[in-house]
Amino acid sequence: MPHVSDVGSTSHDQHDPFLVAALAADDLAGTDRDRAIELTSTCADCATLRDDLLALARATAAAPPPIATRPRDFQLTAADAARLRPTGWRRLVGAVRSSRAFVSRPLGVGLATLGLAGLLIGNVQLSLGSAASAPAQNTAPGGGTLALPAASAASIESRSAADAAALEPSAAAASMAAAGAPVPIGGPVASAGGATSLPNEFQVVPLAPSGAGKSLASAVPQSTTPALDSTTEPIRPLNLLFGLVFVIGVAVFVASLVRGRRTA
Amino acid sequence: MLDSPRLRIAISGGSDLEDLRSTTVSDDPVQRRDLILVENARAGDLGAFNDLVVCYQDQLFALIVRMVPDRDQASDCVQEAFFSAFRNLAGFRGGSVKSWLHRIAINAAMDIQRARKRRPVQPYPELDDESWQPPAGKDADPVTTALTTERHKAINDALATITDDQRAAIILFDVEGYDYAEIADMTGVSLGTVKSRIHRGRLALRDRLAGRMELFRG
């Protein structure tokens, strides 16, 4: 075995100090350990480094805390306790967070899946409904007029109670069309499908004598058309509900993931 | 506090412990005491929780003040840790109460350190009561005492200059005596990362103390 002092330290810069540190902590095995032992037995600087690291570990363990006395008492007062006790929704969140992972995680995943599925199905239904109503509009003659059958208008009206409530003028239009009156298509009725709207030239369709058309045109103001565009369609309650379920599911899942990290 | 009637009853009683000791049933009286206090605190007994605070506040402050070497910040950190423990009593899963409290305190300290990094105002101030040292033995040699004092000051100063992660890992390993797996669990990193932080931290300490290593040799 070569004597430590016999080995020059010129090559020490190329030695791996991390390996020596790992050896000092007794964290090495196999070839790494052999390499580290060889380094410390052939390089004086590596040997010194190992001894220094061991000495520092001992000194760290023996050192008192830099500030000896705590500046205050940390006991909780009754007011602290009252403030910190979870109430209301925090208690609910706490219950979810403190529940076992095998309960809260599947619950979160299930809720999120249910919410997502509900959103998808609801919106697919919606777009299918729009597609069904689209041909009636697309096959319109190019003259800028389109007669919407009363039955079609009525079916659009009856598709959703929410739509009917939101698009009140379409109901009026449907009833007028059933009575043989001209039907305004560009506005409420055309956008009842939710996903499509007709260009401006289809705003008013005179089907009957001009007097009736004028009266209907005046009954449905032009300014309502942009407000009923598909981009500004009111959020359906069912979508809102499923969205909420999805968000709650994700929140429960995330809470169950981070639960153990900080306090468990 | 340790002589309080409540505690004596708690230690001798030892009922209703099984729910808390999900992993191992401890024969350690301290551990049994802690579990009973936690159980009583869960049932709404603030006094039981405060008994726990009294038992651990010095330990927690000594731990945190090494990681956050500023008296006020360390103090806030320990207080926040006890608040957090009280809020999350229901989340305690059994095992060592001491480790549970240490984990909460370490997380609180790391939060403070992260906040300090986000809003850097000034480095940690000089430790304000450097004069304090543990009482020397009657036969202590003045030279040895002076050397020891100097050594402690040097190591604490050097510890304050390495990275927060390295400091936390070294303190938990060398001072608190936790093993790698426990530290990994407490700090939320892998075993390899813990080892790496300890090794690199010690190398960094040696760099900082390059001119004063004679204090530690021999």
Image (cartoon, grey):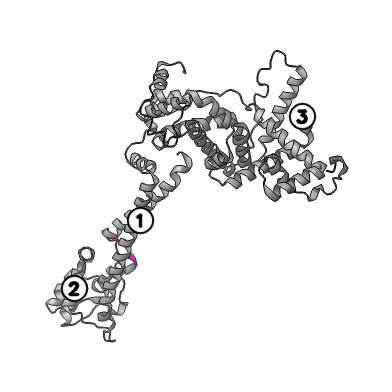
Residue A155: mark in rendering: 2
A143 drawn magenta: no
Q: CA distance from mark 3 to mark 2?
A: 92 Å
In this rendering, position of residue A168 left or right of residue A101: left
Circle number at residue A200: none
Tag 1–tag 2 contact (CB < 8 Å): no
Q: Circle 2 marks a residue in which chain?
A: A
Question: Can marks 3 and 2 be said to lie on one chain?
Answer: no
Magenta residues (range): A231-237
Q: Residue at x 61, y 42 (%)?
A: B165
Residue A234 in the magenta stretch? The answer is yes
Mark 1 falls within which chain? A
Mark 1 falls on what kind of element? helix
Q: Earlier in the sequence, mark 1 or mark 2?
A: 1
Q: For residue B183, which quarter of the picture?
A: top right
The amino acid marked with disc number 3 is Leu
Q: Residues within 10 Å of mark 2 (few under 14, many from 20)?
A: few
* Residue at image location 29% in from the left, 56% down from the top: A241
Q: Amino acid at mark 1?
A: Ala
Nearer the camera: disc 1 or disc 2: 1
